Amino acid sequence: MLMEITIQLEAAKDILKQHFLTSEQPEEKKDPVFFDFVKKKTEPLFDQIECWEEEALRLAKNREISVHPQLIQSTRENFELILMHSFYIDVKLQRYMELHQAIDYVFLLIKNDIAKQ
């Protein structure tokens, strides 16, 4: 189950990256219409990353994967950050890419651990 969620989140992360790279910063960040648009687009991903974290922490607790629980929690936080930054375009490209790479690293560790089983 964790492998499937991880692969889905990777695909979503790449779509978010494209959105970040090709979109303009919104004119009015506090616009209720824009907020509703972002909420509608991101809510399923917030739910999915929460499920991912729960499953990853369960597997880490059972020692089925060798990723430290703090790293799992940080990855969720980083994913949530890129979710918002992808729409609000309110961070420099370098910072966005650092978050992106940190997520990639943990996803790769988890996929490798699961593949070994």
Image (cartoon, rainbow, N blue to C red):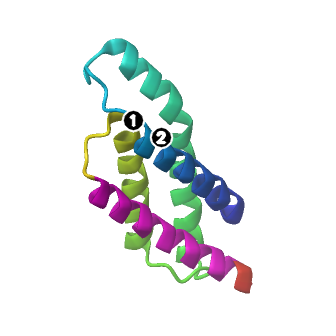
Residue 57: image tag: none
- Residue 73 visible here: no
Mark before the other along the chain sequence, 1 or 2: 2
For the point 66% across and 63% down, which residue is it? 2
In the image, is residue 68 above or below residue 79?
A: below
* Region rendered in magenta: 93-114
Q: Main secondary structure of the magenta part?
A: helix
For the point 52% across and 67% down, which residue is it? 57
Give x and y (percent) for residue 33.
39, 13
Q: Amino acid at mark 2?
A: His
In the image, is residue 30 above or below residue 83?
A: above
For the point 44% across and 27% down, which residue is it? 39
Residue highlighted by disc 2: 19
Residue highlighted by disc 1: 87
Give x and y (percent) for residue 72.
45, 67
Give x and y (percent) for residue 54.
54, 58
The answer to whether residue 114 is left or right of residue 84 is right
